[in-house]
Image (tube, grey):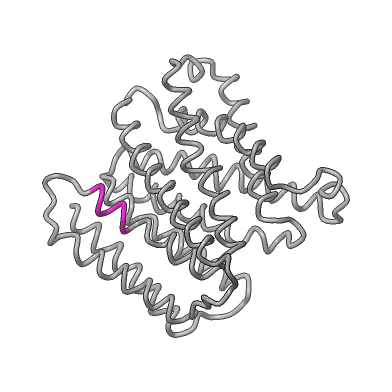
């Protein structure tokens, strides 16, 4: 259990890096950065699968599962989130996505765990989300596309929640597949989907090549592809194999915590009192959830 908890927290730490990556390459759109990240993930996974032949000896059902889960947890999720941010701004989609840990805890509760044990963690997480919203008021007057953006955000939340539940169930059913092997399968499937994502919503290749910071952008895509996608997926698979879905869901809150920490470091400033209070509530909620699952 301890190994699973640390793996889940480490995955959150790597996922949090994605939120400051666009600030390192401001000339690159979020779609281009996401596609570059996932193509890098897919390329590394393909190379590793070719080097380790045992990992490629899987059935057709493995391929279908990898393709479906890659859409839910990677390309489909991020594409919907991009459209949500485009139409509704950043605050509302962030709040909706922040509900993923709540849904995973509610839908993935172990049979023997009483609801009373989950309530403290759930309440603290909800309170932390409320404080975050109060700290950054939501502006709903963003034109007639606002509610379409809300719908996109809800769809993206449903996608990743489904991915978290189905991926954990798949790993627990196929105990012969290691966390690394499955991360590589997901990577190849995600890389293929990322090419489609770039073709559907990305910038023209000539525009990308004309950017002055193209070398830095390529390095960011490779770094996030290896760290925030490949390695983070391995760590998340380890957590999914060793922990219940409800506890894994609570550990997703660490992504928000690390994203805030990286942002504060990047800006060279301390969090506001309300932001600090929200972080404390998030951490306390994680601790309460861990204690409930012991």
Q: How many marks?
A: 0
Q: Give the main secondary structure, helix, strand or loop, of the magenta stretch.
A: helix
Q: Residue at x 82, y 43 (%)?
A: 205
Decide: is 172 above or below 235. above
> Looking at this rendering, what residue extends furthest in the bottom direction?
273
Decide: is 270 above or below 120. below
* Placement of the N terminus among the 4 image quadrants: top left
Residue 255: % across, % down? 45, 58
In the figure, is residue 283 to the left or right of 218?
A: left
In the figure, is residue 200 to the left or right of 97?
A: right
* Residue stretch rendered in magenta on the structure: 102-108
In the figure, is residue 292 to the left or right of 67?
A: left
Q: Residue at x 48, y 62 (%)?
A: 150
Residue 24: % across, % down? 70, 61
Residue 207: % across, % down? 84, 49
Decide: is 277 above or below 41. below
- The residue closer to the viewer here, 210 or 158, is 158
Q: Residue at x 39, y 60 (%)?
A: 253
Look at the image and say whether residue 171 sits in the magenta stretch: no
Residue 5: % across, % down? 33, 50
Look at the image and say whether residue 105 sits in the magenta stretch: yes
The answer to which image quadrant residue 166 occupies is top left
Q: Residue at x 23, y 64 (%)?
A: 288
């Amino acid at each position: 259990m301890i190994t699973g908890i640390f793996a889940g927290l480490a995955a959150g730490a790597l996922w949090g890096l994605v939120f400051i990556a666009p600030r390192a390459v401001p000339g690159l759109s979020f779609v281009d950065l996401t596609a570059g990240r996932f193509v890098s993930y897919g390329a590394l996974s393909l190379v590793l699968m070719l080097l380790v032949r045992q990992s490629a000896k899987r059935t057709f059902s493995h391929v279908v599962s990898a393709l479906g889960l890659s859409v839910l947890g990677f390309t489909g999720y991020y594409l919907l989130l991009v459209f949500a941010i485009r139409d509704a701004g950043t605050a509302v989609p962030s709040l909706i996505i922040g509900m993923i840990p709540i849904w995973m805890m509610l839908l993935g509760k172990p049979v023997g765990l009483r609801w009373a044990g989950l309530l403290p963690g759930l309440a603290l997480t909800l309170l932390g989300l409320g404080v975050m919203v109060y700290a950054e008021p939501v502006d709903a007057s963003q034109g007639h596309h606002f509610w379409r953006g809300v719908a996109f955000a809800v769809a993206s939340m449903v996608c990743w929640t489904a991915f978290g539940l189905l991926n954990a169930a798949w790993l627990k059913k196929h105990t012969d597949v290691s966390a690394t092997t499955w991360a590589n399968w997901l990577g190849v499937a995600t890389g293929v989907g990322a090419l489609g994502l770039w073709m559907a919503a990305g910038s023209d290749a000539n525009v990308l090549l004309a950017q002055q910071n193209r070398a830095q952008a390529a390095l960011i895509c490779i770094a996030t592809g290896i760290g925030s996608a490949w390695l983070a997926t391995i760590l998340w698979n380890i957590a999914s194999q060793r922990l219940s879905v409800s506890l894994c869901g609570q550990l997703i809150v660490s992504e928000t915590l690390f994203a805030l920490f990286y942002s504060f470091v990047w800006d060279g400033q301390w969090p506001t009192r309300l932001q600090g209070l929200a972080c404390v509530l998030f951490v306390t909620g994680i601790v309460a959830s861990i204690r409930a699952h012991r």
